[in-house]
Image (cartoon, helix red, strand yellow):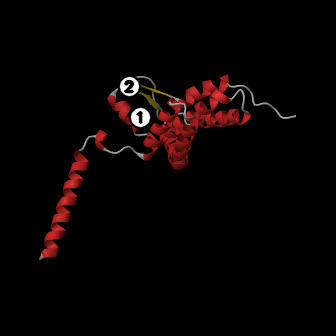
Amino acid sequence: MKYSKRFNLRLVSAYAGLALTLLAPREAFAQADHEKLTTAAWKCFKATDYTCAITNAQACIEDWKEAAKDLQTKLEKAGKEVPTGKVSNEVKEAIFANGPLNDVATCYFIIGEANRPFVRTNVEKLKAAKAAYEEARKLTFGRCWDPNGWFWSPAETASQRLRALPAVPTSK
């Protein structure tokens, strides 16, 4: 009899936990790993700790690039449009649902940005910035949320940054 009571208490507790989870607002859930890594990369970047920014961005890309590519392909095949700028709450939630794609595109962009201050004096940093921006450009459906209230496209901004970079010197 003791066993069945203990089992019933566990079962009731499990159902209660499930009910609370299902009823909790979106904000109550823990951030996904890709969100944590992207947030950490941005914080490091803003603090001009470029090594830390690149490390966090690379970790996100390594773990989530396949999911990002799958989402990119799915959106391409569906002929979906993903807007930039201010959007309705419904569209905002739809864009946030593409989290791995958004974060991987953003992390490629962050890597490009973290290398950019050094591109005029360091050929390896120039190559790294170009490679990161090229990868960001491929993820055309990725969006980055600006805390001021709108979305922007890492792919579009990476394209602009690429045009502004100097050419890679050729070795003689």
Residue 167 position within the rendered picture, expressed as x and y whole percent measured from the top left? 74, 27
Count of numbered circles in the view:
2
User: Observer-nearest residue: 7 or 69?
Assistant: 7
The part of the image, by quadrant, that contains residue 7 is: bottom left
- Please tell me which of labels 1 and 2 falls first in the chain: 2
Task: Estimate the x, y position of residue 79 in percent, counting from the top left.
Answer: 49, 35
Mark 2, other Cα within 10 Å: few <14 / some 14–19 / many ≥20: some
Specify whether residue 55 is in view: yes
Image check: 29 left or right of 1?
Answer: right
Quarter of the picture holding the N terminus: bottom left
C-beta proximity under 8 Å, tags 1 and 2: yes
Task: Say which of 82 and 115 sits in front.
Answer: 115
Residue 72 location in percent, x, y?
52, 40
Distance (Cα) linking label 1 and label 2: 10 Å
Q: What is the three-letter code of the residue carrying label 2?
A: Val
Q: Residue at x 50, y 29 (%)?
A: 46
Q: Residue at x 25, y 48 (%)?
A: 22
Q: Nearer the viewer, residue 97 or 9?
A: 9
Q: In this picture, is 56 found above or below 143? A: below
Query: Residue drawn at (24%, 44%), measured in percent from left and top?
Result: 24
| Residue at figure coordinates x 72%, y 28% from the top left | 121
Q: Is residue 142 visible?
A: no
**What residue would you read off at disc 2?**
87
Query: Can you identify the residue that label 1 sits on?
Result: 95
Q: Name the kind of residue labelled 1 in the image.
A: Ile
Q: Secondary structure at mark 1?
A: helix
Q: Is residue 89 above or below residue 35?
A: above
Percent of width and height locating residue 53: 54, 37
